[in-house]
Image (cartoon, grey):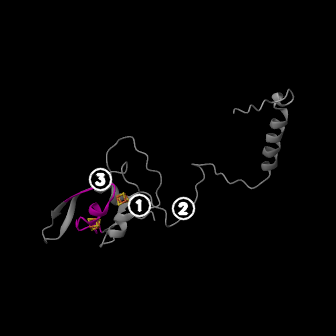
Amino acid sequence: MIVKNKPGLFQRFYLLEALAGLKITISKIFKKKVTIQYPEERREYSDRYRGMHYIKSVNGVENCTACMLCPTVCPAECIHIEAGERDDKEKYPVKFEIDSLRCCFCGMCEEACPKDAIKLSNIYEMSQTTREAYDKEYLMEQRGHK
Ligand code: SF4
Ligand code: SF4
């Protein structure tokens, strides 16, 4: 059975509803604002926030030894590493790319890394004008934001 809830003539002017809405608006004017004027104002984010990745390095040499653990655990399969060997037989990533469009920022790569090389920073502004993955040089530049 269809029940029709027909508004009366007075209700059709919506005057009471408009006034009720206005009352709520006015009651909020002098209350403390919860919004901020982004991008001029920014909030401090929690240390647990997981944003843009970066690769830790010492004197320009990345901590990563291309052990392939992070691409193995990554559920989005968005880490691509090509390993190489230095003169001292130490392994290093010749290529290290992260496709942030596929990444779900789960933090498993950070958890899995035995060298504490890959980290997630608190950078949340990651818009790009291309679809290219972040490369090693870019990821190393992002260091120190957490
Ligand atoms: S945060 Fe998760 S999805 Fe993103 S690269 Fe790391 S393991 Fe993969
Ligand atoms: S887990 Fe760490 S050391 Fe191993 S490849 Fe990934 S970033 Fe490099």
In this rendering, would 20 be left or right of 145? right
Disc 1 marks which residue? 106
Q: Of the numbered discs in the image, which one, if any, rests on residue 45? A: 2
Sequence order check: which comes first, mark 3 or mark 1? Answer: 1
- Local secondary structure at mark 3: loop
Asked if the residue at label 1 sits under 8 Å from ligand 1, the reply is yes
Residue 45 occupies which quadrant of the picture?
A: bottom right
Indicate the quadrant containing the N terminus: top left, top right, bottom left or bottom right: top right
Tell me the amino acid under the disc marked 1: Cys
- Which callout, 3 or 1, points to the residue nearer the camera? 1
Residue 137, quarter of the rendered image: bottom left
Residue type beneath disc 3:
Asp
Q: Residue at x 81, y 49 (%)?
A: 27
Task: Specify the segment rendered in magenta.
Answer: 59-82
The x and y percentages for residue 87 are: 12, 68
In which quarter of the view is residue 94 placed? bottom left
Give the camera-side residue of 105 and 38.
Answer: 105
For the point 83% across and 28% down, the residue is 13
Mark 2 Cα shell of 10 Å, populated few (<14), some (14-19), many (≥20): few
Q: Position of residue 145 (x, y in %)?
A: 44, 62
Could you say whether the residue bearing mark 2 is in a helix, strand or loop? Answer: loop
